Amino acid sequence: MPRPQPAILLPIPAAARYLSFVVTPGADSRGALKTLATLVDGERCVAGLGASLVASLGARIAGLHSFPALQSTRLTIPSTPTDLWLWLRGDDAGELFHRSRRIEDALAPAFQLVDLTSAFRHGDGDDLTGYEDGTENPKDDEAVAAAIVAEGGAAPAGSSFVAVQRWVHRFDLFEAMSPQEQDATFGRRRDDNEEIDDAPPSAHVKRTAQESFDPTAFVVRRSMPWSDGRRAGLVFVSFGKSFDAFIAQLKRMAGLEDGIEDGLFRFTRPETGGYYWCPPVREGRLDLSALKL
């Protein structure tokens, strides 16, 4: 039986690489995807397929569509779709380098690598600001219910939908805030991770309180810090049984719901945005049967 790609429900690794590809015009993407299926076990490597790739194969996955660009009074949240997204996971950055190189070679010339981001675990799973990331993640059966398509769903059972954004932090702006302002921005105290009862409406925890939406907006976050040596931030990764919970949270963060922007925008902005369908796995390899592959 197909089952979810295991890493969706596992803790974040020590190191990671995110690879984004586009299809080379006129290339045999079907043959390359069959090769990819043998390379993706869902644990050391998670794969997501974009809407344009699925459509080019003459297939349809219910609920899969392109990431919507959002615009508020002061904010632009970009959409930068690609055809294929891979999340390589491991403990050794050198091993990940060589593994990503081999995958890139295996997919060429059908797929061209257009973006690569190296990421890492910081502390006990903290953002580079020092605040814990993913505190409100659902656990166990609740995580499965939030992130994985159940039997009888519109999309193939065991699959998932992932929203991916690379956020760039301005540490000069963040460090110009007082410790109290920083805590109020997140709505939690950095020292003990406790939620602040009287945090302002712009506090991130209030903007994204999953139980406050109707319907509720639970997602499984597997975000990791990144750095290219000069710039740094957070690769935001949100798995869901659909994109509905993610977009509800993002619209509220942008102030499209009530005009109140998330305090995080005081020091960070997303520079990418993509939606992908994560197929299930069967017998240790990616199950692309929904695409007739």
Image: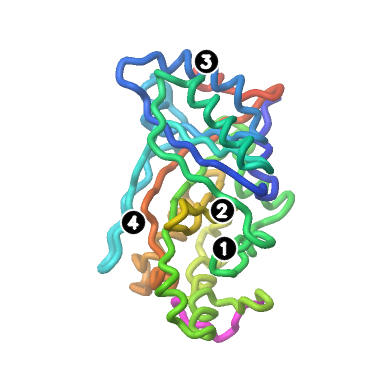
Is residue 29 rendered to the left or right of residue 194?
A: left
Structural crowding at the residue carrying mark 1, measured as other residues with C-alpha within 10 Å and reported as few (<14), some (14–19) or many (≥20): many
Q: Where is residue 150 in the image (x, y as percent from the top left)?
A: 63, 38
Residue 207 falls within the magenta-colored stretch: no
Q: SS class of the residue under badge 4?
A: strand
Which badge, 4 or 2, comes first in the chain's sequence? Answer: 4
Q: Are marks 4 and 1 in contact (CB under 8 Å)?
A: no
Is residue 157 rendered to the left or right of residue 254?
A: right
Q: Are marks 2 and 1 in contact (CB under 8 Å)?
A: yes
Q: Do the residues labelled 4 and 3 touch (CB within 8 Å)?
A: no
Under mark 2, the amino acid is Ser
Which badge, 3 or 2, comes first in the chain's sequence? Answer: 2
Structural crowding at the residue carrying mark 2, measured as other residues with C-alpha within 10 Å and reported as few (<14), some (14–19) or many (≥20): many
Where 214 sits versus 141, above or below?
below
Structural crowding at the residue carrying mark 3, measured as other residues with C-alpha within 10 Å and reported as few (<14), some (14–19) or many (≥20): few
Note whether residue 124 is visible: yes
Which residue is under mark 1?
127
Q: Which is in the foreground here, disc 4 or disc 1? A: 1
Q: Position of residue 6 (x, y in %)?
A: 68, 37
**Label 2 – label 1 distance at C-alpha:** 9 Å
Residue 102: image quadrant is top right
Q: Which mark is residue 223?
A: 2
Range drawn in magenta: 194-202
Which residue is under mark 3?
293
Q: Position of residue 81 (x, y in %)?
A: 36, 40
**Label 4 – label 3 distance at C-alpha:** 34 Å
Q: Do the residues labelled 3 and 2 touch (CB within 8 Å)?
A: no
